[in-house]
Structures are given as C-alpha cells and as structure tokens.
Image (cartoon, grey):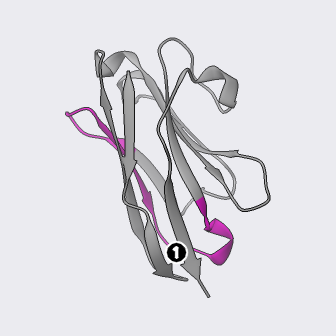
Amino acid sequence: VQLQASGGGLVQAGGSLRLSCAVSGRTFHSYAMGWFRQAPGKEREFVAANRWGGTSTFYADSAKGRFTISRDSANTVYLRMNSLKPEDTAIYYCAASATRFGTREGLYEYWGQGTLVTVSS
C-alpha cells in the first residue's frame, strides 16, 4: 500500500485548502483513513478519520466545524480545511488502516510522506 499526500501550500489566515491523499496497492474500501499533523517542535496529532465505507467519522476538537474529511469513488481521501488559523501550520500526513479505526497513530499501518500547510497571519 502506498499513500501520496498533496495539496499543501501557503495560505492567509481565514483561507481554505483541500488536501488529497491517493491510495494505491489494495482494495481501497477496506481501509479506514485518517489525517494527522505535526507542527514545528510538537508531536504529531490526530486531525480527522473516516471509517470503512465512509459511515463514521472522527474529528479532533481543533478541526470540528472547520475541517471535513471525505472520499470519492476513486482511491482518494480529502481533507477540506476552512477558516484556517496560524496554529494550523503543520505537516499533514494521511494514514490508512486495514482493520482498525480510531484516533491513535498506532492504529494506522500505512503513512504518506506528508504535505506542508503554512498559514500566515
């Protein structure tokens, strides 16, 4: 399984970005997908996750109401981020799990390389 994240960039506070994560190598609908982020000098943290078939979703408190995780019929999961704040600046990673779903990093076996999001004030 390979994950390729993209869509990061520089945006002003209040702006929006949509991150994409393309999955290849196995039957996509079998996976739970998640987004995590790591800000400079901080540990990686959970952002959002979507369960098999898109029937269940978790969001971190910092993401609720502003971020939306979704996927389409192809092997791609998205993270739509609105009302971005400088504290959202981080490297964003997508992750996939073959059998489990949740907010902990250890549940996810496969990781993308990360895409940098920078929010200026």
Farthest residue, direction left = 73
- Along the viewing direction, whichever of 41 and 100 lies nearer the viewer: 41
Give x and y (percent) for residue 81: 47, 63
Which of the 4 image quarters holds residue 3? top left
Residue 57 vertical position relative to residue 116 in the rendered view, above or below: above
Quarter of the picture containing the C terminus is bottom right
Task: Please give the name of the residue rendered at 47% of the width and 69% of the height, measured from the top-left corner.
Answer: 82
- Along the viewing direction, whichever of 2 and 48 lies nearer the viewer: 2
Q: Which residue is mark 1?
A: 83
SS state under label 1: loop
- Along the viewing direction, whichever of 9 and 98 lies nearer the viewer: 9
Q: Which residues are magenta?
A: 70-90
Task: Please give the name of the residue rendered at 48% of the width and 42% of the height, measured from the top-left corner.
Answer: 113
The type of residue carrying mark 1 is Ser
Which of the 4 image quarters holds residue 118? bottom right
Residue 91 vertical position relative to residue 82 in the rendered view, above or below: above
Residue 96 vertical position relative to residue 69 in the rendered view, above or below: above
Task: Please give the name of the residue rendered at 66% of the width and 48% of the height, measured from the top-left corner.
Answer: 60
Farthest residue, direction top = 99
Q: Residues within 10 Å of mark 1 (few under 14, many from 20)?
A: some
Farthest residue, direction front = 113
Q: As drawn, is 10 to the left or to the right of 90?
A: left
Q: As drawn, is 86 to the left or to the right of 116?
A: right
